[in-house]
Image (cartoon, grey):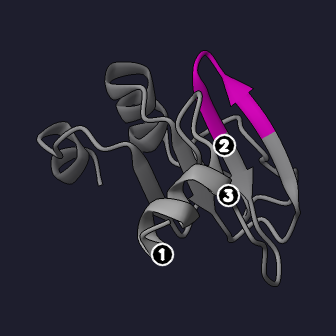
Amino acid sequence: MEVFLRDFPAVDVFLSHNSPRNIHDREDGVHIGFDALAAYLRRVKPGIVVHGHQHINRETVLENTRIIGVFGFRMVIVQEPGFRMEKKVAELLGC
């Protein structure tokens, strides 16, 4: 994992099976995050990380990264600052 993420390019949204270490960890020896993913987040600072594995629905913000633990399913809405849905729909409909 360390080798793979060391050269992984910067992204805005990162989807992972597991969480970064010390974020949403559980104390059962199995549901603990990856050190390499935590290092990647500190280096790249993506806007959003979505992960499973810990069987929780929880959000944490680390610096400027929104880390979302998902158990089951979850809808995540991503918007740019100042984005107006009504304006975008009107543009798409040609209004």
Q: Is mark 2 on a helix, strand or loop?
A: strand
Q: What residue type is labelled 3?
A: Ile
Give the camera-side residue of 11 and 80.
80
Q: What element carries label 3?
A: loop
Give the camera-side residue of 62 and 31.
62
Circle nearer the N terminus (3, 2): 2
Magenta residues, start to end: 60-66
19 left or right, relative to 75? left
Give the camera-side residue of 14 and 53.
14
Q: Which numbered disc, 1 or 3, marks the residue closer to the eye?
A: 1
Q: Which amino acid does label 2 sit on?
A: Ile
Residue 67's tag is 2
Residue 77's tag is 3
Residue located 32% across and 27% down the image: 44
Residue 93's tag is 1
| Image position, residue 81 (x, y; %) | 57, 28
Vertical arrangement, residue 64 with respect to residue 2, above or below: above
Circle nearer the N terminus (1, 3): 3
74 left or right, relative to 76? right
1 left or right, relative to 45? left
For the N terminus, the image quarter is: bottom left
Q: Distance between the residues labelled 1 and 2?
A: 34 Å
Q: How many labels does the image show?
A: 3
* Snapshot quadrant of residue 28: bottom right
| Image position, residue 45 (x, y; %) | 42, 26
